[in-house]
Image (cartoon, rainbow, N blue to C red):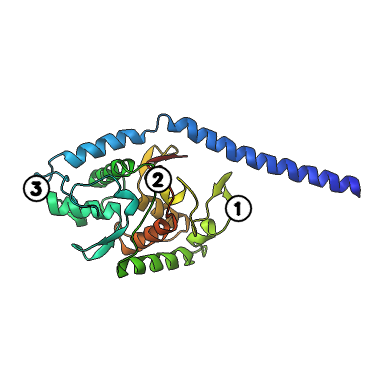
Amino acid sequence: MKTVLLALAGVAATAAMAQKSATQSIEEYRAMLADGNPAELFEAKGEDLWKQKRGPKNASLESCDLGKGPGVVKGAFVELPRYFADTGKVQDLESRLVTCMERLQGLNAAEIAKTPFGKGEQNNVTALATWIAAESKGLKFNLPQSHQQEKVAYEVGKRLFFMHSGPHDFACASCHGEEGKRIRLQDLPNLTKNPGDGIGFAAWPAYRVSNGQMWGMQQRLNDCYRQQRFPYPTFGSDALTALSTYLGVNAQGAKSIAPAIKR
């Protein structure tokens, strides 16, 4: 009996070491890729788009207010989503950019919202978001919660995070609601609290190596809904903004590493 117990303990120890090895290997893989993160190309494009005069009004986005005053980019990313008085609603980075593109440049916000990710002006929105995020790399998240609508967005996002839906009865919390969960050899961070620097909300936008695409946070959340076999929320929807608010407030104090690189 003692021999059997020792054998079982050995198997358990070996399995634990294998799991740790897999996690370490993935982290090493990411570290190697980060040296030449293709997100840098999107950063350059985004900076150029910010300064370029475009659209029916032949104007740039240099007077766009992302929450810290017209044209101020540094530090804006780590304080979004937030309430904007000129739209009367809480907006995340991507939806706020579309507001500026419509008001300053005369582009059609509704058409941009209907455009698939990675196509046309949506691709430009992702590039802009990538550059703006990069300008706040290393800064700590500090989403405001002073306005009533910001507080409401947080509470709605929290309910959506725990809401089970779809044919598999999944929720965001099914994967990210507790410690110690894994999928495809990867650790799943607990996003109901601050998961730490550069994890979860603090890593997007990010370049996806598996499909060679740059993803903003809205596309990342949509993909979570896809995996739940649930209909995609509309781009710029209050649901996506609320979820981002919940995740962003939970990430309070974490340092941003966006734009990151993912498998």
Residue drawn at x 48%, y 30% is 32
Residue 243, percent from left and from top: 39, 60
For discs 1 and 2, the disc positioned in front in the rendered view: 2
Residue depth check, mark 3 versus mark 1: number of the one nearer the observer = 1
Q: Earlier in the sequence, mark 1 or mark 2?
A: 1
Residue 145 placed where, x, y %? 35, 63
Residue at horizontal 87 percent and vertical 47 percent from the top: 4
Residue 167 lies, with reference to residue 79, above or below; the image says below
For disc 2, the marked residue is: 256
Q: Amino acid at mark 2?
A: Ser
Q: Position of residue 54 (x, y in %)?
A: 13, 43
Q: What is the CA distance from the residue labelled 1 to the residue labelled 2?
A: 23 Å
**Of callouts 3 and 1, which one flags the residue occurring earlier in the amino acid sequence?**
3
Secondary structure beneath disc 1?
loop
Alpha-carbon span between mark 3 and mark 2 = 35 Å
Residue type pointed to by label 1: Gly
Q: Residues within 10 Å of mark 3 (few under 14, many from 20)?
A: few
Residue 78 image position (x, y, % from top left): 34, 50
- Which residue matches tag 3? 56
Q: In this orientation, does residue 184 appear? A: no
* Residue 46: quadrant of the picture: top left
Q: Mark 3: which amino acid?
A: Pro
| Nearer to us: label 3 or label 2 | 2
Instruction: Name the residue beneath numbered marker 1.
Output: 180
Task: Classify residue 164 as left or right of residue 118.
Answer: right
- Density class for disc 2 (Cα within 10 Å; few <14, some 14-19, many ≥20) is many
Q: Which mark is residue 226?
A: none
Looking at the image, is 40 positioned above or below residue 158?
Answer: above
